Amino acid sequence: MRIRWRRISAGTAVLAAAGLFVAWAGIIDIRASTGHWRITDWFLHWVMRSSVRTAALGGHAPRFTAAMLPLAAGHYETGCAGCHGSPAMPRPAAVENMLPPPPNLQHVNATWNDAELFEVVKHGVRYTGMPAWPSMERDDEVWAMVAFLREYPSLDQAAYQRLAGFSATGSRDFDAIVKSCEGCHSPAGPDETSLIPRLTDQSETYLRDSLEAYATGKRPSGVMKVALSQTSSEDRKKLASYFASQSVVTETGGPSGMISRGKVLAERGDRTRGVAACAACHDAAGVNEAYPRLAGQPVPYIENQLGLFRRGNRGGGAYADVMTRAAAGLSDEDIQALAAYYEALPQD
Ligand code: HEC
Ligand code: HEC
Ligand code: HEC
């Protein structure tokens, strides 16, 4: 028995040494230019598909809504199209020579189910260049991208550009940066079915704090991190001041029962359940400039932010903890009522 173990370990050592020798000799081909043998290509994709399938087991997609599409489409254009191409931007030539080349996603999405797409988009694919989502804390953003990828094959160029709110990033010119922001944060005011907030009428302090929080990861969002990747902290200060000086008043409304329920909760809170009065901090005269205004923000955006605070992963500026406590006791119904109330609240 002892002899056999000795042989096995000697054999293993010889194999390891031979492996190292082969690697050292430089005869393993790592050139992307020559491509893979067909069998290697098949094998690698088989490994990838099996790995994704297993990792995605038990994953449950949330209900997909139209609110998810604009932010995902806008992010797709800046964060994905540079490799995968889009109806507005053909795949750059340099990328076609990657090994493996990033596929045209209008053709391949159907071969994956929702949970598998989620897995690929959230974690990326090792050894291929397919990057992970920029923020591991924001599964809701990744699901929004999956919702978009499901719609993507049926979008023509016009429909795609409309969703992505067309813009150009990558330029250091301030006007071009502002345009890129406005591609998502429409200067005409918020779309009330959107997860994207309105920036106008917010204080400069709050905008500046938020932009720094996104840039440093203290407020996790893959979408905003990529949107800010071309900006310096000087640019971000200028952006905060620019957007704080813009103002758009929007017409809003919603089911009135919900609104009055939200109003009571917002103005008085609910002592019995430990819910603080929101109005003590939001949309009131003389409150701390770092507290954001909520009036006129779209319902889906407010609901999503309250959900993030309640789960404890919204992050933000120096006072964000205060808000995490304020949201801890809210029920789903409270959140719906509060969102309806604040969307309908007139901006002054
Ligand atoms: C740096 C280039 C690059 C970027 C940026 C990129 N990808 Fe990829 N992507 C790849 C490569 C390479 C693959 C692997 C293709 C393969 O295995 O054949 C891939 C694979 C995928 C796949 C699986 C498709 C398949 O069937 O192989 C999906 C889905 C996908 N990417 C979505 C996205 C999304 C959504 C984004 C933006 C958030 C994105 N990718 C950003 C390079 C990129
Ligand atoms: C791809 C779409 C997209 C682009 C481009 C974009 N944003 Fe955003 N922005 C979002 C989304 C979605 C959110 C909400 C993120 C979250 O859940 O925290 C957001 C949130 C914000 C917030 C926080 C607002 C609040 O009420 O808390 C600020 C400030 C902001 N963006 C500024 C900018 C600026 C400045 C730019 C341009 C450099 C920009 N955004 C570009 C989609 C975008
Ligand atoms: C003690 C003060 C305080 C109270 C009470 C409070 N909030 Fe907040 N809230 C804040 C602060 C501070 C932030 C900004 C966090 C950050 O991003 O730095 C915030 C952020 C928010 C946001 C995100 C806004 C955006 O543009 O992203 C929403 C939505 C919100 N609060 C809703 C509510 C509601 C609804 C209530 C009542 C249940 C409430 N808040 C009670 C201080 C408070």
Image (cartoon, grey):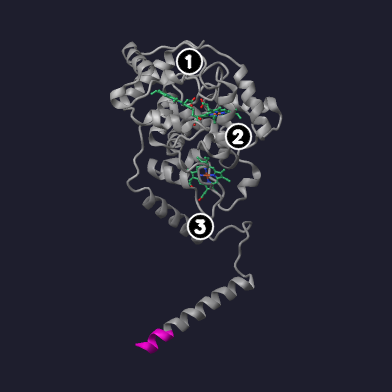
Residues marked 2 and 1 touching at CB (< 8 Å): no
Question: Magenta segment, principal secondary structure?
Answer: helix
Label 1 neighbour load within 10 Å: few <14, some 14-19, many 20+? few
Residue 224 place in picture, x, y as percent:
55, 33
The part of the chain drawn in magenta is: 1-7
Given the image, on which type of amino acid does mark 3 rest? Asp
Disc on the earlier residue, 2 or 3: 3
Q: Is residue 22 visible?
A: yes
> What's the mark number on residue 343?
none
Residue at 61% across, 47% down? 96
Image: 171 above or below 122:
above
Disc number lying in front (2 or 1) = 1
* Secondary structure at numbered mark 1: loop
Disc on the earlier residue, 2 or 1: 2
Disc on the earlier residue, 1 or 3: 3
Residue at 69% across, 32% down? 171
- The residue under label 2 is 228
- The residue under label 1 is 284
Q: Is residue 166 visible?
A: no
Given the image, on which type of amino acid does mark 1 rest? Ala
Given the image, on which type of amino acid does mark 2 rest? Leu
- The residue under label 3 is 41
* Secondary structure at numbered mark 3: helix
Of 121 and 203, nearer the camera is: 203
Instruction: Determine whether, in the image, residue 239 is placed left or right of residue 40.
Output: right
